[in-house]
Every structure is written in structure tokens, then in C-alpha cells.
Image (cartoon, rainbow, N blue to C red):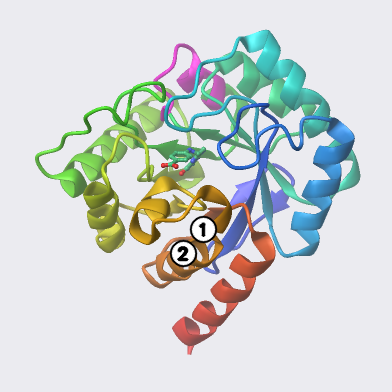
Amino acid sequence: MQFRDKQLDLSRPQVMGILNVTPDSFSDGGRFVDPHTALQQARKMVQEGASIIDIGGESTRPGAQPVSTDEELARVIPVIEAISRELDVIISIDTTKDAVMREAVGAGAHMINDVMALQGEGTLQAVADLQVPVCLMHMQGEPRTMQQAPHYEDVVSEVRGFLARRRQACLEAGIAANQIILDPGFGFGKTLEHNLRLFKHLPEIGSPLLVGVSRKSMIGSMLDLPVDQRLHGSVALAALAVWLGAAIIRVHDVAASVQAIRCVAAVQRI
Ligand code: PT1
């Protein structure tokens, strides 16, 4: 897949490193708000094997409160500028706002990661204008309330159907078919059973697929462990997602995930 001036081979699994520049993120909140600290963390993730850095200035974890456009821009733009200047890596902007999408690509971002799948005002047009790859994610509800009472008749077919409709909306807006990535949205308006059912049926969701389960509460529920002790569960599910065909794995712990994924990919390719 082409990401502006950079090419990424999605026939091999790729790791997206998470860089939260929010004071309230669920697992590493406030640690990388300063652009210099953020750049150091990005550099470490690139050295450990990440091919994409996903920068987010608005937390979307369960219960999170929205932030203003100005606040989000003030957090992410200096970090995008620094990484774009200093590192040879694909920069993803995790946002639901059209203004942030446009400014971020102007500052050097290569792709859009939207947990609202371009349903926000002006976002379909922004991505159509910018002509960069986009990740469309499924969510039931909105972050503040999405875990209150998630409900599906058939979670796999509903998530697959939603993503197929959002892909179609993208095509009709003028976004190229080969620039669209799909994501079932683990933990976004889903119970543990919904998350596990989606995971087991990952190959039916569509492709190429991005999977993000790193340190999430689904792992906490299965293992009865707090967020700072979910590394092993996260790495196990990253490896399994690759086995089930995921192209991009979104993680906090890049070194551990890259090692596990390389081993799975070696078995897969023989
Ligand atoms: C994701 C994702 C994301 N996750 C994409 N972008 C988050 N494309 C942010 C919990 O249950 O999976 N895909 N951007 C983080 N969101 C959550 C959701 C964090 C749930 C934690 C939980 O603990």
C-alpha cells in the first residue's frame, strides 16, 4: 500500500506503535505529551521494528471525554512535525475531526485512523481531498457511554456489514479502494463475548485488517489483571491476529510484539 512517498508491504504483518499525546490515556496517559519525549518514544518504537506510529490527541477509551479541535491540534501537530523531520516512518493520525485530519497531513502525517469510520462531519471529503490511506473502525455508540450496554443480534455479521457500508461510502466519495483498511474495533461498544467472537471470526470481517487489542480490558477480564500486567496476553493475541490474517497490529509494546509476530509469520510463509 502506498502512504504518500512511502510504500508498505501488507502481505507481511506490520506493527503500528501507539503514541498517545493525551493527559488521560488509559495505559500511558500523560507520558508523551511533550514533543521531545514523544519523539524519543517514537524513535524507540521504530528501532524495535514498528513501521507505523499512530499519534492520538483525543482518548477514545471507554468513558473518555471529548476534547476541542484546538486542544487536539496543539497536542498532535508539534509531535507530527518532529517525527516527520527526524524519523523515516509512516505517521498515522488517530482522529475523528476533519480539521485535525487536514492539518496533520499538512504537517507530515501519511494516513488517517478514524474510530468513527469517517461518519463525522466533513471527514469523508477531507480524506477524499487528502488522498491518503484510511483505517475505518467499527464502534457501537460513543466512547463516553459505549460500554454501558453493548448489544448485537450477530456481532460478526453486524460489524462486517457496517465496515462494508463505510467502505462503499468511501468509494462513492472518491477514496481509492486500495487505500482502505478495516478494523473491527475491539473494546468499542462490545462485551468480552462480542470481542472473542469477533476475534475468532476475524477472517470474515474483510481485508486488509488492522487489529488493536493491546492492554485492553478484554485481556484484563480474561486474566483478571490490571492494565500494567497485560503484556503477555496482548502479545498472545497479536500473534493470533497475525495467524488469522491481520495485516497491521496496533500495540504499545513494540519489541515483544514484533518478535512474536515474526515467528508466527515465519511459520505462516513456509
Ligand atoms: C483500535 C483503537 C484505535 N483503539 C484503531 N484505533 C484505541 N484503529 C484507539 C479497553 O477495553 O483498536 N483500532 N484507537 C484505544 N481504545 C480503547 C478501547 C482502549 C477499549 C482501551 C479499551 O480497555
Residue that mark 1 sits on: 230
Q: Position of residue 24 (x, y in %)?
A: 61, 27
Residue 254 visible in the picture: yes
Residue that mark 2 sits on: 233
Q: Nearer the viewer, residue 116 or 109?
A: 116
| Other-residue count near label 2 (Cα within 10 Å), few / some / many at <14 / 14–19 / ≥20 | some
Q: Amino acid at mark 1?
A: Arg
Q: Position of residue 134 (x, y in %)?
A: 52, 37
Quarter location, residue 68:
top right
Q: Nearer the viewer, residue 94 or 194?
A: 194
**Residues at marks 1 and 2, CA–CA distance in whole angstroms:** 5 Å
Q: Nearer the viewer, residue 250 or 269?
A: 250
In this rendering, the answer to whether 206 lies above or below 24 is below
In this picture, residue 2 sits left or right of residue 222: right
Q: Position of residue 95 (x, y in %)?
A: 56, 26
Q: Nearer the viewer, residue 45 or 146?
A: 146
Q: Cβ–Cβ below 8 Å for labels 1 and 2?
A: yes
In this picture, residue 200 sits left or right of residue 107: left
Residue 106 visible in the picture: no
* Element at label 2: helix
Residue 121 inside the magenta-drawn segment: yes
Image point 59% across, 61% down: which residue? Answer: 14
Residue ranking furthest to the bottom: 270
| Other-residue count near label 1 (Cα within 10 Å), few / some / many at <14 / 14–19 / ≥20 | some
Q: For the magenta stretch, what is the residue range?
A: 116-127
* Element at label 1: loop
